[in-house]
Image (cartoon, helix red, strand yellow):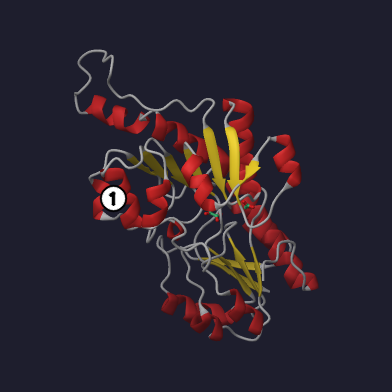
Amino acid sequence: MKIFVTYPINEVGIKYLQDHGVEVVVNRKKRPLKPKELEKILPKYDGAITMLFDKIDQHFISKLGPNFKIIANYAVGFDNIDLEATKQKNIIVTNTPGILTEAVAEHTWALILASARRVLESNQDIKNGLYKFWQPSGWLGPQVWGKTLGIVGLGRIGSFVAEIGYYGFKTKIIYYDLMRDDRFELELKARHLSLNELLERSDIISIHTPLNEKTHHLIGKEEFKLMKKNAILVNTARGGIIENRSLAEALKSGKIFSAGLDVWENEPKVPVIFKGLKNIILTPHIGSATLEAREKMSEIVAKNILSVLKIGKALNQVN
Ligand code: GLV
Ligand code: GLV
């Protein structure tokens, strides 16, 4: 049994697989492999651990051999993989849910607070020599405590971000999701609203939906028109959910106060219009980048692989 890992990950899972007699080969090129390179490599393997930057599309899947059984994506999101195409070839796809919820929720709050209180902008100003004296009206931002937090997409991460807001900052919770969650509504006194109502009422909007045809450009020009003037928009989910240009225009014109993005459309490429904006914070897709979460992610991908190789069943199948 032979597994390919498309980029080096935390060693725990690799060791686990080796200890169970699986041969593991890791890409040591220090860069992502191109689809053409992967196409040549993968037919020799029984499965792969893939990264969110690997585009596993229909064409790619058609090249995989008959022994290829599992794609274990090293992420909770799996929009990089064409699930329909994998089903047709009986390839199991797995993700890493649950163990990175706290990490992503923490980072979401880091972005909310930093966006509201201009942490990075003021830090940059100091380094540029602009802090000459204490300023009674300098670097002002909206208070977060007691404000209305709008959660778009109430999965594990969205719920946990809401809990931190409710218990830590006494935020009022509103949410938009296709499904209602009675327990959540009761516990956090949360209200379920339409997306438009949520956008109109939120002081802080936090995105937590997966990326798919329904959520692609969910937030665009018309949606920004509905937002409050001092609204803060944070995205730790997937870039394609918010349309870059409309966001940049809303930030530039002061339509909203600021944005904190861990993900954006076409990352890692940074749109030129983002570079000139002071009220946008960008982080390099590090939501799950805690030592703890990445170790657990490594464990989970390995356990899924072993389970599929041994008994043909996964722990976290998504297709
Ligand atoms: C990271 O974005 C993930 O989906 O785990
Ligand atoms: C992801 O795990 C989510 O459910 O939010």
> Horizontal and vertical percent for residue 113?
45, 31
Crowding at dot 1, Cα within 10 Å, few <14 / some 14-19 / many 20+, comes out as: some
Residue 234 found in image quarter: top left
- Whether residue 244 appears in this view of the structure is yes
> Horizontal and vertical percent for residue 201?
50, 40
10 or 169: nearer the eye? Answer: 169
Viewport quadrant of the N terminus: bottom right
Query: Mark 1 sits on what residue?
Result: 249
Viewport quadrant of the C terminus: bottom right
- Whether residue 100 appears in this view of the structure is no
> Horizontal and vertical percent for residue 24?
61, 66
Residue at 64% from the left image edge and 76% from the top image edge: 46
Residue at 57% from the left image edge and 57% from the top image edge: 75
Under mark 1, the amino acid is: Glu
244 or 146: nearer the eye? Answer: 146
> Horizontal and vertical percent for residue 71?
61, 70
Q: Secondary structure at mark 1?
A: helix
Q: Quadrant of ligand 1?
A: bottom right
Residue at 48% from the left image edge and 65% from the top image edge: 27
